[in-house]
Structure formats: C-alpha cells, structure tokens
Amino acid sequence: MMTLTLDTPALARQYEDLSDKQYEHGKLLIQALGLGLGWRVLDIGCGTGRLTEYVAGLVGKAGHVVGIDPLQTRIEIARARASTNLSFQVGRAERLDGFFDNSFDAVYLNSVFHWLSEKRQSLAEIYRVLKSGGRLGISTASKERPHELDRIVQTVLRRPPYARYPDALETPPYKVTSEELSALLEQAGFRVRTVEIRSFTDYFDSPGTVIHFSNASSFGHFLSGLPQFLRTAAIREIEFELEKYRRPEGIVLTRNVIFAVAEKK
C-alpha cells in the first residue's frame, strides 16, 4: 500500500545526490515541451527541485516556476534553490486548489505519474490550471516494457519465501502502458501530440548503489511490502543477480521511459 510516511531526511538527501538519471531524462522532457521566456510553469512531484531550478533558468526572470511535492523532506531541500522566479511548496497532483484556473503555460510530471493512484482526478486538475493551448509533459515508467532492474527484482521475489508477499512485486504500483496513457489524456480533454518509449542505458559502480537509488527514488518503498527480516535477505539476492550485469564500465542496466506531450484544447 502506498504511503508517504516512509521517506526520511536521509533518503531525501540521498535522492538529491543520486538523481542524475531522472534529472537528465527530465531535461529531454522539458526540451520536448518547448518552453518560452516569460512562461509560468508548474512542476508536479518536483522532489528536491533540481529540474525545477533548471526550468526557472529557461523561462527567465519574466517567467515563474512553482515546484510542488507531497514530501516535506524533499521540499525542505528544494527551498534552498528558491529565487525571484522559483518557488516551492508541499502539494499533491490531485489537489491543485491553491492555483487559479488557466494560470500556467505548462505543467510537467517527471518520473511521477507512476506513483499517482488518482490519475483521472490529477489530469482534471492539471487541465483546469493550464491556459488554453497550455502544454503538459509526462515521463513515466513503462508498464509494457519494464526496467531491467524491475525484471531482476521480480525474478527474486517470485522465489520462496518472498512469493508469499505479492504486494512487494509491483513498485511503483500505478504504471501504465503508452496506450493507456494516451487514452487517459484524451479522456481528460487533452490533444495528444506525442507518446513514445525511450530506452536509456544506466551505469552503476556497485549493486549497493542500485539499491540506494531505488530506495531513495521510491521514497522508502523499495521492497517495503516485505517484512524487514526478509527484505534484508532479498536485497542480498538482488545484489547477487545484479553482479551478473557487471561490465568493465560497471553494472549496466536498461531503463524504459514513456514520454508524452499533450496540450489543452
């Protein structure tokens, strides 16, 4: 079951240090949005604010970027980045009542949509706060083409004794396919411009770094469906499997991400 109570200041700081991969593919999402000077932009699920700060540089002093995240620990780090055209606050995608109708030129969710259980409500709220012709960008884990790490984790968790805890199998729990995402956007009233899956090759110096990144980026949810005594054992088995992916440049894993851009009609 999804909860926001597993995050800690240590995990938030770890995410700040290890989030290069999500930050870099986030910049590709922003490029696809084609932001302009003076734009007002909303970053939903901004985390520690690295990408939000980057976007603030793109819209310039005449623009403004707001980053929201439900995790107070991450917003506290993000607020150190605040400036005259950049602000942060605690908030959730499905409740944007703090923002007026038609108030943003663009909204984006980078590596966030797969954590949202209330997708229709979230998209309805995004539609409301976007101006006519405003743009929405989403990058999210692909249900039809899981990350290589997901397949490794599921291979381990289907073994006894972990198989008794099926809830541990799916993290993040609310992934969609490209087709499902297109349908959700259209049902919400958006005009879909592009939906595509891009693959990335990631390099890690050790299996431990993979585990640390997975736990930090999931705000403590990695293997959280297992009892603690089994979680420790499962991590050892996953690390053993990860060693099979070691190459001269490190542990090499493939990651698949859906990129979608839509606009308010």
Image (cartoon, helix red, strand yellow):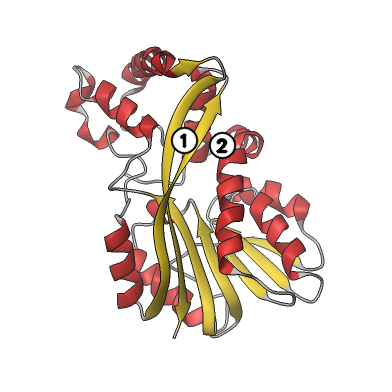
**Percent from the top left, x then y, of residue 11?**
57, 34
In the image, residue 205 sits, relative to residue 66, either above or below, namely: above
Identify which residue is drawn at 51% across, 60% down: 109
Nearer to me, 181 or 172: 181
- The residues bearing labels 1 and 2 have C-alpha atoms spaced at a distance of 8 Å
Nearer to me, 57 or 81: 57
In the rendering, which numbered label is found on residue 220?
Answer: 1
Looking at the image, is mark 1 or mark 2 earlier in the sequence?
A: 2
**Percent from the top left, x then y, of residue 233?**
35, 13
Label 1: how many Cα within 10 Å (few below 14, some 14–19, many 20+): some
In the image, residue 236 sits, relative to residue 44, either above or below, namely: above
Residue 122 in view in this figure: yes
Q: Quadrant of residue 10?
A: top right
- Amino acid at pointer 1: Gly
Identify which residue is drawn at 65% across, 66% down: 66
Tell whether 9 sits left or right of 137: right
Tell whether 128 sits left or right of 55: left
Disc 1, disc 2: CB below 8 Å?
yes
Identify which residue is drawn at 61% across, 54% down: 27
Residue 15 in view in this figure: no
Kindly identify which residue carries mark 2: 8
- Amino acid at pointer 2: Thr
Q: Quadrant of residue 158?
A: top left
Q: Nearer the viewer, mark 1 or mark 2?
A: 1
In the image, residue 143 sits, relative to residue 218, either above or below, namely: below
Nearer to me, 193 or 221: 193
Q: Image quadrant for the C terminus? A: bottom left
